[in-house]
Amino acid sequence: MTSPSRRLTDKLTVEEFCADLHISRSTFYDWRKKGRAPRCIRIPNGALRIRRADYENWLTDCEDHA
């Protein structure tokens, strides 16, 4: 069974996502509007969360394979 603390950390807030990438919130929302951000979950209060697994997969997809 997953512990409560693990469940809290398996999703990122928009603020955590932006801080990790050193980008502004406006950049995140611009990417989201253009379909370039990772998949998000909209929770009942309207806030967005990003599953850590989706974030990691998105980062892998962003890698330059040159």
Image (cartoon, helix red, strand yellow):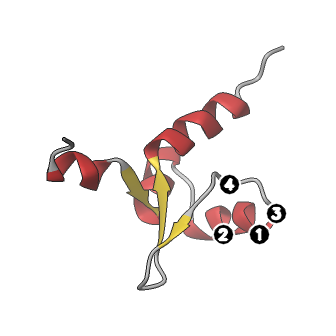
Residue drawn at point x = 15 percent, y = 46 percent? 3
Which label belongs to residue 33?
1
- Could you say which is closer to the camera, residue 7 or residue 12? 7
Give the residue pinned by disc 2.
29
47 left or right of 64 in image: left
**Which amino acid is tagged 4?**
Ala
Residue drawn at point x = 26 percent, y = 55 percent? 8
Residue drawn at point x = 51 percent, y = 50 percent? 22
Distance in Å between CA atoms under marks 2 and 4: 8 Å
**Which amino acid is tagged 2?**
Tyr
Label 4: how many residues lie within 10 Å, few (<14), some (14-19) or many (20+)? some
Disc 2, disc 1: CB below 8 Å? yes
Label 2: how many residues lie within 10 Å, few (<14), some (14-19) or many (20+)? some
28 left or right of 52 in image: right
Give the residue pinned by disc 4.
37
- Could you say which is closer to the camera, residue 44 or residue 22? 44
In the rendered view, tell whether residue 29 sits above or below residue 3: below
Q: Quadrant of the C terminus?
A: top right
Distance in Å between CA atoms under marks 2 and 1: 6 Å
Give the residue pinned by disc 3.
34
Disc 3, disc 2: CB below 8 Å? no
Q: Position of residue 47 (x, y in %)?
A: 46, 77
Disc 3, disc 1: CB below 8 Å? yes
Secondary element type, mark 4? loop
Distance in Å between CA atoms under marks 4 and 3: 8 Å
Q: Position of residue 15 (x, y in %)?
A: 43, 63
Secondary element type, mark 2? helix
Distance in Å between CA atoms under marks 4 and 1: 8 Å
